[in-house]
Image (spheres, grey):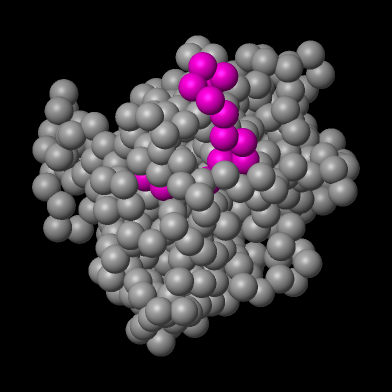
Amino acid sequence: MDKTVPNLATAVAGIHDGATVMIGGFGGSGAPIELIHALIDRFRATGHPTGLTVVNNNAGNGHVGLAALIETGMVAKLICSFPRSADPVVFTELYKAGKIELELVPQGTLAERIRAGGAGIPAFYTPTGYGTDLAAGKKIEEFDGRPYVQERWLKADFALVKAERADRMGNLTYRAASRNFGPLMCMAAAETIVQARTVVDPGAIDPEAVVTPGIFVQKIVEVTAPQQEETLNRAGAVH
Amino acid sequence: MSETLSNAQIAWRAAQDIADGAYVNLGIGFPEMVAKFQPPGRQAIFHTENGILNFGEAPAPGEEDWDLINAGKKAVTLKPGAAFFHHADSFAMVRGGHLDVAILGAYQVAETGDLANWSTGPKGVPAVGGAMDLVHGAKRVAVITDHVTKDGKPKLVERCTLPLTGVGCVTRVYTSLAVIDIAGGHFVLREKLPTLSLEALQAQTGAKLYLDGPVADLIVPEI
């Protein structure tokens, strides 16, 4: 079994118009910059994909990565918990102009909705959001005398995730706190596309150390020197 | 002592109530300051939503690792015994009742324990982050805040007028003037600045202050 693909362009070639795409990362930590830029490059060359729904904790920063993806106009809707950043100008302007839809989700609910999507659980109850505007219209049920909000699973057509090491079967490890939403998104997408700093042969990753088992991964591309959003933004980079 | 406590002094006072070994989440911004004022001999374990337990202070400029950040997207370091985990586990720690304390900022706190701290209304881009999750599950949810807004309006009120973060969730408020518990739908005054009369404090508070035993002097070092 070998899930590797030869390059970034091939990795993102199947993402279609109107797709729901989960993108890993929390701010710049874990953001798969090269996969996002490959998707932007494809759009600039072909006009596709467009009308995307993107799931990420944030809305990007500066003019690279997720912010650059939003800036192209490819994203019709963003599902996220915190669309603010040090330099959120791209999302803010499109949002205020009514050119991008926002579904705001509390961060823990976002994580659990993605986990539930990957785990085959269509809905769950959480105390989060009860009595707030973000629970408006949602089913409320009491358990042991406390009210809880029903939340639905979240699934995607594709996930773009950054890993540290991948073996050819798709077993993944992550670096430091960059895993954040990655392991959840790998579970919740029909096709998970991973960029890994190192691709190794099966057996080279200790099974005890595997964070995401390969069953949740469909495509792997090696990106040996991945860029960091924060570093790019400090250098004033624009994609 | 000055007439009101500085943010650092409010943070210092809140830090005195964190036990050795407590698992603590500090909201982004002002609450992060609480970590600086742990009493000698005590070490809390700090949790950040993006998947770290037992992170420490910021690294020296130029030594940042941008895969190692806190919920405020600031670079942090690790202490011995740190752990990484994914977002669903992180919020299991939050909602599952595993954190001892969450300390958050506030726009308004109501005498019912309702908290408003995520939105000032329909203007601008709404952003909630982990605030709505954090107010549920921690054994204690404390707020640190100025006692009144910049234009002098009470932040401690009978009912919040701003969009709620959570209902009936706050148990203690540390302000620039006082330490106040929330119990039985009331603000219960525990400590106040010694130079401040009860009447003057009440005048700056938007709901009735109840007394339950003696009120201690709120004594905080100059910082």
Q: How many marks?
A: 0
**Which residue lies at the image location 75% right of the left edge and 33% below the top edge?**
B77
**Residue A180 placement (x, y as % from top left):** 50, 39
- What quarter of the picture does the C terminus of chain B occupy? top right
Name the residue rendered at 51%, 46% in the picture: A221
Instruction: Tell me the residue at 13%/33% (across/down).
Output: A142
In this orientation, which residue lies closer to the viewer: B65 or B111? B65
Q: Is residue A25 left or right of residue A86?
A: left
Q: Position of residue B63 (x, y in %)?
A: 85, 43
**A187 shown above or below B80:** below
State which quadrant residue A185 falls in: top left
Q: In terms of secondary structure, what is the magenta stretch mainly?
A: strand
Residue at the image point whose x is 36% and y is 75% from the top? A48
Residue A164 visible? The answer is: no
In the rendered image, residue A198 lying in the magenta stretch gets the answer yes
Please say if B157 is above or below B140: below
Residue range in magenta is A192-205
Closest to the observer, B25 or A97: A97
Q: Is residue B18 magenta?
A: no
Taking the image as shown, residue B172 lies to the left or right of residue A187, namely: right
**Position in image of residue A103 (x %, y %):** 31, 63
Farthest bottom residue? A97
On the image, the x and y values in percent for residue A81 come to 42, 55
Left or right: A223 as drawn, with respect to B58: left
Q: Is residue A76 left or right of residue B82?
A: left
Q: Nearer the viewer, residue B5 or A89?
A: A89
Is residue B64 at all visible to an observer of this figure? Answer: yes
State which quadrant residue A122 falls in. Answer: top left
